[in-house]
Amino acid sequence: MDHSLPKPWKCLVDDRTGILYFWNPETNVAQYERPICPPPRNVAQVSLSSSYACFGSCTIEFDGASRGNPGRAGAGAVLRASDNTVLFYLREGLGF
């Protein structure tokens, strides 16, 4: 099992050619290109002004936690400009 694939994708081998392909059993889509993870849910984004994009420094703060292993988990991150303005943040539930 390839844990780096987004759920519910599966990596399979074509019996006739021996070539790897990827299959989504929920949508019945098959493709040769490795599927990419969808963008995270619950994302809030603040547009970067040109002053932040070109000058100064940024700080990223991130953390995560879980209840048990395996178990329900979550993670989050905040990107701040040098004046502590929030430029970007996200939070995401993980696990089951």
Image (tube, rainbow, N blue to C red):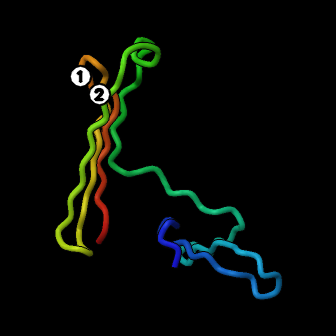
Residue 3 shown left or right of residue 20 in the figure: left
* Disc number for residue 12: none
> Toward the viewer: 57 or 30?
57
Residue for point 24% across, 63% down: 73
List the residue tagged with mark 1.
Answer: 84
Residue for point 28% across, 27% down: 86
Hey, which residue is sitting farthest left in the picture? 67
Residue 72 coordinates in the image, percent (x, y): 23, 68
SS at circle 1: loop
Q: Is residue 49 above or below residue 8?
A: above
Amino acid type at image mark 2: Arg
Residue 38 coordinates in the image, percent (x, y): 49, 55
* Disc number for residue 80: 2
Count residues near mark 2 (Cα–Cα under 10 Å), then give few for <14, some for 14-19, many for 20+: some
Residue for point 31% across, 38% down: 89
- Say if mark 1 contacts mark 2, CB within 8 Å: yes
SS at circle 2: strand
Residue for point 24% across, 54% down: 64
